[in-house]
Image: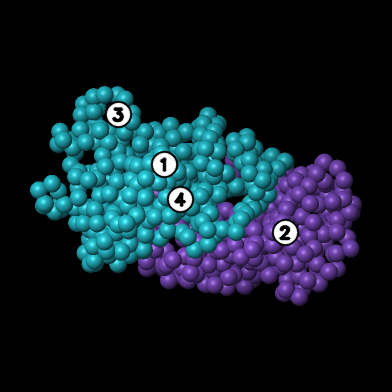
Chain colours: A purple, B cyan
Amino acid sequence: MASASPASGEDSLIARYFRPIATDPGAFDLGDDAAVLKADGCEIVVTTDAIVEGVHFLGSDPPDTVGRKALRVNLSDLAAKGAAPAGFVLTLALRKVDDAWLKSFAHALGEDAACFNCPLLGGDTVSTPGPLMISITAFGRVPVGKMVHRSGAKPGDRVMVTGTIGDAALGLAILRGGNVADAAVADAAVRNLLIGRYRVPQPRNMLASAVRDHASAAMDVSDGLAGDLAKLCAASGVSAVIDLESIPLSAAASDLVSRRIVGIETLIAGGDDYEVLCTVPDDRVEAFAEAARRAGGQATSIGMVVAGASAPKFIDGQGAELALERLSYSHF
Amino acid sequence: MASASPASGEDSLIARYFRPIATDPGAFDLGDDAAVLKADGCEIVVTTDAIVEGVHFLGSDPPDTVGRKALRVNLSDLAAKGAAPAGFVLTLALRKVDDAWLKSFAHALGEDAACFNCPLLGGDTVSTPGPLMISITAFGRVPVGKMVHRSGAKPGDRVMVTGTIGDAALGLAILRGGNVADAAVADAAVRNLLIGRYRVPQPRNMLASAVRDHASAAMDVSDGLAGDLAKLCAASGVSAVIDLESIPLSAAASDLVSRRIVGIETLIAGGDDYEVLCTVPDDRVEAFAEAARRAGGQATSIGMVVAGASAPKFIDGQGAELALERLSYSHF
């Protein structure tokens, strides 16, 4: 991303909307061909996630929520890897220059960049005849060798998850209508809370150092708890047994489950939670939960890592295993 | 980018095509949520460039050339900044999984990653109803504080450019038909050479250390020499006077200009050259040119940096200034 006179449309767009939020000295006011990221003696953790209109967000979603979501899905990866945010670059593919949309998008993105201490370093803006797409590559810093992997889970470790699971899937269901539509969630405040969880994830970056200090393996829940846990187990060469009744649900989600409007499988196979899923050695569970609390979050034990190569089992209150038709979202 | 059983379509795609080329230990076999990039005491230079079907490449371009171009446009930025390639992440937005296309694309990308010592570290694969889009964020290493900026040009410096200018614009013109179509370039080998310059840029990474040692300012020529020089001058607060007859042209381009099939303005306002444009203090010009030769390249002096804020002037053999209708490509 670079901007300089003679101003083209692209340069002018960058100067108007993105230069004001690129406050890090390594961004060179977006006036060069590249940015500089200082390692400060750490290793750089790199993650990249794109969101596409109609796939990861809806064309009707407000632009400020789209900006926040684009960055936060990447921040969530950094949190799960135990890394402190260090900055990001942005690729924006636009059909046209919609000033009102861009102004709101960039302003919200800048607010989140400041709030999460993750400055905009550069980017690229291209035209496309297709849907709006935002691709972000985010950087974090960890002490050398300390990134938390998917692959460290050991039999006997507890399976833990932050926050609550399934709210974003319910928010998306409300936006799409159907059986979780307005009639089932009569309270507008509750509807908005669930929709907000879909549109604006709450990445758990405050818990990153607790994850780094205590977790044997971690990843964020983006495609659904069931599928993501299966991936973590496969990467670690283990299996897991999950107690469905231990999975932390919001009051709104609990209410919908108890009224049988949705089943628990909808919540654990839905996506967009952006919570941290991790495994913690048994003797560190209390310390991890306490560190999470001190950081303003919550971490709940939902089951146990076991030896084996089978898919994780989800056990209900009667001791029966839940049959899952699909584990999570896949693009293809 | 992460791949693990239970294999979804997306995971399987990554395992088949991209895991084999992700050989760097920091990529963790694409089996985690993030990669690790070691700084090795350097600063990390970050650049990002996306290419969109129908905008930056043609739907009819062979997939291996698309893979090479996607990486090379980023490698070119690293070269111009004086940075040694360190790795890249890839975001791929696909309409569908076309195995033959992906196999060829990934194989060529892997060859280039090995050849340029720039390993694949991670990425994201998403579905889109729109055109194919490839967004790459590439990383380089420079000694602390040594990235070459756009902004260091001083009056009296020479303006220098590597390789030859305008071939890619001619290649695109041939692919599009029109006045530079087959009839004007009768020799198929010459046509293929020009088309190859459009489809597969030759980034000047071998010259990166020469640029870092000698240039006062640099950028790569991606949107057209005239426009990119104007940007470099604006960033440096200077102007420039360019001798049109000094601009290095290939034999094919010289021939088309001398036959008046294209004007020089087509060559200097066209894009996709991916040569390094830099300014070099007068007393270092010989050393820079010699270092470029030793590295297997060529660097040609095309003019002089002068004081002032006006757009660079392009002077022909009769001492007249060339009037340019447009300086370079802009997306909006």
Q: Where is residue A206 in the image (x, y as percent from the top left)?
A: 68, 70
Q: What is the chain identity of the residue bearing mark 2?
A: A
Q: Position of residue A98 (x, y in %)?
A: 37, 62
Residue nearest the viewer, comparing B4 with A253: B4
Label 4 sits on residue:
B209
Q: Which of marks 2 and 1 is in front?
A: 1
Q: Residue B294 got which mark? A: 1
Please say whether residue A205 is visible from this viewpoint.
Answer: yes
Q: What is the chain identity of the residue bearing mark 3?
A: B
Q: Is residue A230 above or below residue B155?
A: above
Q: Which of marks 4 and 3 is nearer the N terminus?
A: 3
Label 3 sits on residue:
B191
Q: Nearer the viewer, mark 1 or mark 3?
A: 1
Distance between mark 2 and mark 1 Cα atoms: 42 Å
Q: What element carries label 3?
A: helix
Q: What element carries label 1?
A: helix
Q: Position of residue A13 (x, y in %)?
A: 36, 63
Residue at the image point whose x is 36% and y is 50% from the top: B287
Residue type indicated by callout 1:
Arg
Q: Residue A146 got which mark? A: 2
